[in-house]
Image (tube, rainbow, N blue to C red):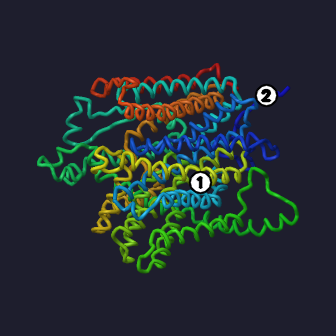
Amino acid sequence: METKREVNLPDNAFRELKPGETYVPIVPASQSIPEATARSFAIGIILNILFSMSAAYIALKLGQGIETAIPVAILAVGISAALRRRSTLLENVNVMAIGATSGIIVGGAVFTLPALFILGIDYLSSVFQLFFVAFFGAVLGVLFLIPFRRHFVEDMHGKLPFPEGTATTEILVAGEKGGSQARLLAIAMACGGVYDFIVISLRLWSENFTTSLVGFMSPLTDRVKLVFSTNTSAAILGLGYIIGVRYAAIIFAGSMLSWFVLVPLFAHLGQGAAAVEAAAGGAASATAENIFYDNVRYIGIGAIFVAGLIGILKLSPVIVQAMKGGMKELAASRHAHAAGAESARTDRDIPMAAVAVLFAVTIALLWVYFRFSVLKGEAGATGLSLLALAVTVVISFLFASVSARAVAMIGVTPISGMTLMTLVVASIVMIRAGLSGPHGMLAALLIGGVVCTALSTTATLVTEFKIGYWLGATPRKIQIANFVGSAVAAVVVSLVIVLLNKVYGFAPGPSHPNPLPAPQPNAMAAVIKSLMSSADAPWFLYGMGGLIALTVEILGISGLAFALGMYIPIELNAPILIGAVVAWLVQRKNQASPGAEGRQDRGTLIASGLIAGGALIGVVSSLVKWLEAQSGRTIIHDFNNTGPTGNAIALVAFLALCAAVYFAALDRKSGAKG
């Protein structure tokens, strides 16, 4: 009879290690259990296909991606419980690694490649080009991050919060352990799911509380353009709880600069959005949101770009060390192989020799792709293809670590902002090289597609590496799982893009009078079209953001976290800070009473459940909306209570949720782990 093993994350899983202290995962390196099995690959591929199709449609229909790692992890645990032999903890990690690549490919491809159809240059492309862009980008992302794995998961252990990685890990551990932790996680998931269902689907109250609907604050709203808003989602509150006060405060400080200083300043100077300038009433006729999205957001993009460059300079010793380590590992592996020695299982990457070969092959195939497919028939195609290859590889490599660090800090990476900057740089480089018109737009867009997918890959993969580090998975198998999952997802997403264009279209026209909104691809298409025709870009705003990021770095503050706050809307940053404050209050209470450690684990588990429940409901709600649009029937009644009354209820409900999380985390009955 099989005895159930007690499964707990070690006490030092989420804190910095003391001098001489080491971290031992749940499944230690000395233990070998089923991991990359045929079962895990089969389940992972099926989930990959399902989530690739649904996530692609949702992204083009609603303009938002969905996080797939958490739902896939939950399904992996659920499917495991229904099988005759329960899947092992590491098999579920492999399922998650394969299935989560659906979100990677969707995040990289769907936000850029439909612009081909919007610009009317799809006759220069094909479904194979779409596949190659998505797949090559994912492969580059994996290869670029492998040398930095130890830095992010070991050297920075306890210094970066990895909020979504923490939530996914708690789900996998609770599913393996069962008992009180699994029940608590299930209750938190149910509460988070029900709460977010009421907010997102039923709309019994507003999803965002805003001071613009508070009557006595109308002078600030209408004249000064000073507006505060916060999302009331349980999932984002849980995210903030895990991130902690340090990063959450820096992020919100960036939002304060954007929304409380720059937006009112642009409004006061009468130099806000284009809508403001065209309006007879001047700045008073535009909303704070107009000014932010049409001007201030570009300052945030410039800040992210410069903060990323500064981060690269700071990481330059790590980059050099990774390169040297790779060469040493290459030489050492030969001696070790001859001597029959091998590194610990939990520290085995794909051998650096294989990484070098894969990188060389990928680079060669990318050049062939640009030379004989994208730029076929163009004058000077060889030189142009080499230039396109250089832009793609250099930008992908430089911003891979930036994307990874951003998601490790706050669970969000500014891929759209970095991709937009990539498109600007690629377009200008191609124009200076003499390539413009349809082929110039095609080259710039496909460069952006590869870079966007590469950055999306590094953002997700660094989280998977950390989950594997906490649990004891083999890094090499996570890397292989990403290659397999990326190939599957790239095929599915490419076919979905072509199919949706034929059925719905992405831009209005005679054949498609009511196309899918596809907001990100339309924005990318507009940027490329304007650059290729006038080479115009908001350089002043980019430069302003860059100077702000430089100033913040000089003050010793994380420029990237601050820049993310400037770029991401305040309604998403405010609940992160509120959740972090709840965690801080719990920590202070814990320090004054026994059983603190157990209650802190309890709070993290509750927050993870809120994130998971909210993520699942986000997917379900999006699918229900799709079914309603397809059938023309109402499945879930929409109360649409988004006026002043719904706004007030939203604030009360959100504060009540915060209080519930606080008191639940302080439950003395759960002081001990268990």
Drawn side of residue 550 relative to residue 407, left or right: left
Above/below status of 349 relative to 660:
below
In the image, is 380 to the left or to the right of 313? Answer: left
Determine the CA span between mark 1 and mark 2: 37 Å
Q: Which residue is mark 2?
A: 4
Q: Nearer the viewer, residue 7 or 215?
A: 7
Residue at the image position 32 percent from the left and 67 percent from the top: 532
What is the secondary structure assignment of the residue under circle 2? loop
Q: Nearer the viewer, mark 1 or mark 2?
A: 1
Disc 1 and disc 2 in contact, CB within 8 angstroms = no
Please name whichever residue, 300 or 531, is drawn nearer the observer in this view of the structure. Answer: 531
- Give the amino acid type for the residue marked by disc 1 in the picture: Ala
Residue carrying label 1: 487
> Which residue is drawn at the image coordinates 37% and 44% (left, top)?
569
- Residue at point 50% right, 45% down? 247
Residue at the farthest right position: 339
Residue 368 coordinates in the image, percent (x, y): 54, 71
Q: Quadrant of the N terminus?
A: top right
- Position of residue 490 measured from the top left corner of the image (x, y, whole percent): 54, 53
Nearest the eye: 13 or 285? 285
Tell me if residue 402 can be seen.
no
Where is residue 261 shown, x and y percent of the image?
Answer: 30, 48
Front position in the image: 371 or 25? 371
Residue 414 in percent (x, y) is at: 45, 52
**Residue at screen point 49% across, 49% down:** 106
